[in-house]
Image (cartoon, rainbow, N blue to C red):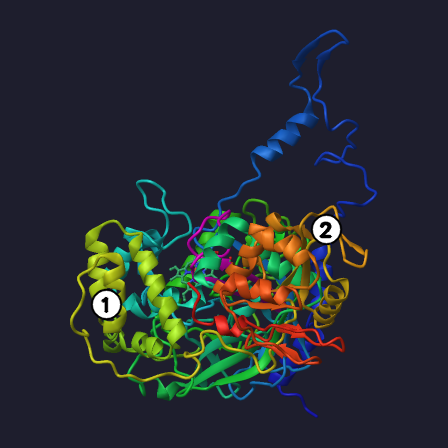
Amino acid sequence: MATTAAAQAVADAKSNSISADGKFADMQKDTVEVNGKQHMTTDYGIKISDPDHSLRVASDSSTGPSLLEDQIAREKIMRFDHERIPERVVHARGTGAFGTFKLFESAEDVTTAGVLTDTSRETPLFVRFSTVQGSKGSADTVRDVRGFAVKMYTAEGNWDIVGNNIPVFFIQDAIKFPDVIHSVKPEPHNEVPQGQSAHNNFWDFIYMHSETTHMNYWQMSDRAIPRSYRMMQGFGVNTYSLVNKQGKRHFVKFHFTPDLGVHSLVWDEALKICGQDPDFHRKDLISAIEAGQFPRWKFGLQLLPEEKLDDFEFDPLDATKVWPEELIPIRYIGQLELNRNVDEFFPQTEQAAFCTSHIVPGIDFSNDPLLQGRNFSYFDTQISRLGANWEELPVNRPVCPYMNLANRDGALRHRISKGTVNYWPNRFEANPPATPAQGGFTSYPEKQQGIKARALSEKFKEHYNQAQVFYNSLSEIEKMHLAKAFSFELDHCDDPVVYKRMSERVAAISLDLAKTVAKNVGGETPTKQLRTNKGTKAKGLSQLEYMPEKPTIATRRIAILIADGFDYNAYNAMKTSLEAQNAFVFTIGSQRQGVVADSGQKVVPDNFFSGMRSTLFDAVFVPGGSHVENNLAKNGVAKFWITESFAHLKAISGVNEAVPFIARQIGLDEVQSAKSGDSLTDSYGVVTGYGDASGLKVSNIGPQAKGLAE
Ligand code: HDD
């Protein structure tokens, strides 16, 4: 069959489409095994005989001066002195992993991009999750937006989707970015607070810019305290374009929806985990991948034919607005899977660099004013962080063949371009440009009209409708959490102008919410809603915490509390049952030297009671046995473990002697019990109990705790 030029381009792409392993193999080229047999050397290759002593004048009885000629000690100390590079000016705290993108359904009706049309491919990728406001060493579980940056090493070049876990953004025009980030980062006079939006400047900025309202409500919702990077959505946020073979353009928004569903911490948990385990999300991602429990997201497109751009009350190019799913449904066509941890954090995660301007043929930009500015910023910032040749670093390098004549030299250049010309055209016709039929990138020939002005189109001026729809879409518990979030944040503002004005502003969305917040933070209690409440709910927005089709306890962290005299059978039966479902089970004992069961078996716990906290687990199980009254019931940490789990809506299970102990800790006389053989699953999909032939009594209290949490 005569291949058309486009088909040829796809065939070419397929022929050089690099498998995920291909990318890793390429990256491994630069890897040295730390535990290998190779002797230690200096950076210039000589083997080191003694890395622990500087060269000096010395004798048995005296120690003289160290010698300047000691090139080994000098190199080691110099390298240490220059280890730090500038952290990211925003999104400094993050964690990355490698994986693959698999396309299930071709989108050739809307694009020519090989990564979105060739279902035979598996495209290697790298994802970095991040917070926004904190420094590189700040804690993971702060209240914050989460970055969701995807770098796809496609056969036609790298495609970066630099998104967040919230579908909108604070501002409409990129020129405001330095302001919004300055307002949320530590204040200039005292460098306080670290990684928190709860301070005067941020809320002053929010009040001054009503365009931030929609994003601000998402940020005050449970979405901003995710349970795990693996349990949060990813959104490209900005409007891009897709262009098909006929040159037809669709505007597009990109979506990543997690197989595990969307789950959040409760605020009291998030606060505590910041101190108990600042790396909670980072370890959660690494251990899930290590255990082979690869997190997956469905990849979807929202598509808007170009001619429908003006069909909405909002402007689809406005990044502070969502495209409601009921108006523009999401078409899921692929899957992103993370299946490989980095080998070394600095070269692969710290040096990873993303650009919103990195798109491949078949994809194009839009006039989204936020995207337009982002396209400048990312490319610019990498140079100050990593230098001009940052795209040569293994984690940033494309997997497809790449070279050009003009981009040469610059610090740390290490690619070698052999040849005598570095310009085009040249007498050898070396490295010619590619025609579109040969895969050359061309921009969509969009007609433009208008005058030069610092302005936005009329529809950008509406700032509240979608914030109200979002708020109306929340459940009662989610609204309660949001009210507590606003109250916590504004309570940390000590300038009355800030919290009084913000209390009033909240009445633009909900009078009830505004009254609660004003009372808590010291604002004037508003008496009227500042605008009509349209009362609409939106699909997709109403599920801040939504369950996937098949709830699972896989990778959920479940603690089993034991002390001397525990019922080994119950312990072992539950542990086996949970591990069979790929839950991560941790035995928490009275001491880690070992705990002896009633029947004599000795178990060495993973941790001892005071080494861990209930906040680091999703559920807790207490086996029966004499350990309950003889130890747990007398142990404040063990008792608080139950009380705190209950306050945090956790699933709590116990059998036999444990049941009255649990009931006492949470002040419930009656606990739900199961018949033998039952397997209880609460709404979180966590097995909260098991029955067996011995008729063990099982309590399932988790769901009843709903709504009592802080
Ligand atoms: Fe940004 C980093 C996401 C608006 C300028 N941004 C950065 C990262 C993410 C986002 C996930 C971390 C990438 C990584 O892991 O290395 N940013 C967003 C989203 C935005 C957004 C979803 C709104 C739709 N960003 C935004 C604007 C500007 C920037 C409007 C500038 C005009 N962003 C940057 C940056 C960063 C960055 C300063 C800092 C580190 C970096 O680029 O590599 O260029």
Residue 70 in view of the camera: yes
Residue ID at (75%, 69%)? 573
- Residue 432 in view, yes or no: no
Ligand 1 quadrant assignment: bottom left
Please provide percent x and percent y for residue 192.
36, 44
Is ligand 1 closer than 8 angstroms to the Cβ of mark 1?
Answer: no
Farthest residue, direction top: 61
Residue 424 falls inside the magenta stretch: no
Residue ID for mark 1: 515
Q: In the orientation shown, which residue stands out farthest toward the right?
A: 37
152 is within the stretch colored magenta = yes
Q: Amino acid at mark 1?
A: Lys
Q: Residue at x 40, y 72 (%)?
A: 478
Say what secondary structure mark 2 lies in: loop
The crowding category of the residue bearing disc 2, from other C-alpha atoms within 10 Å (few below 14, some 14 to 19, many at least 20), is few
Q: Can you give x and y, in whole percent of width and height, for residue 582 in the image? A: 70, 69
Answer with the quarter of the image where residue 615 lies.
bottom right
Left or right, residue 272 beside residue 506: right
Q: Residues within 10 Å of mark 1 (few under 14, many from 20)?
A: many
User: In the picture shown, does residue 76 fall above or below 399?
Assistant: above
- State the extent of the magenta-drawn residues as a range: 124-153
Label 2 near label 1: C-beta < 8 Å?
no
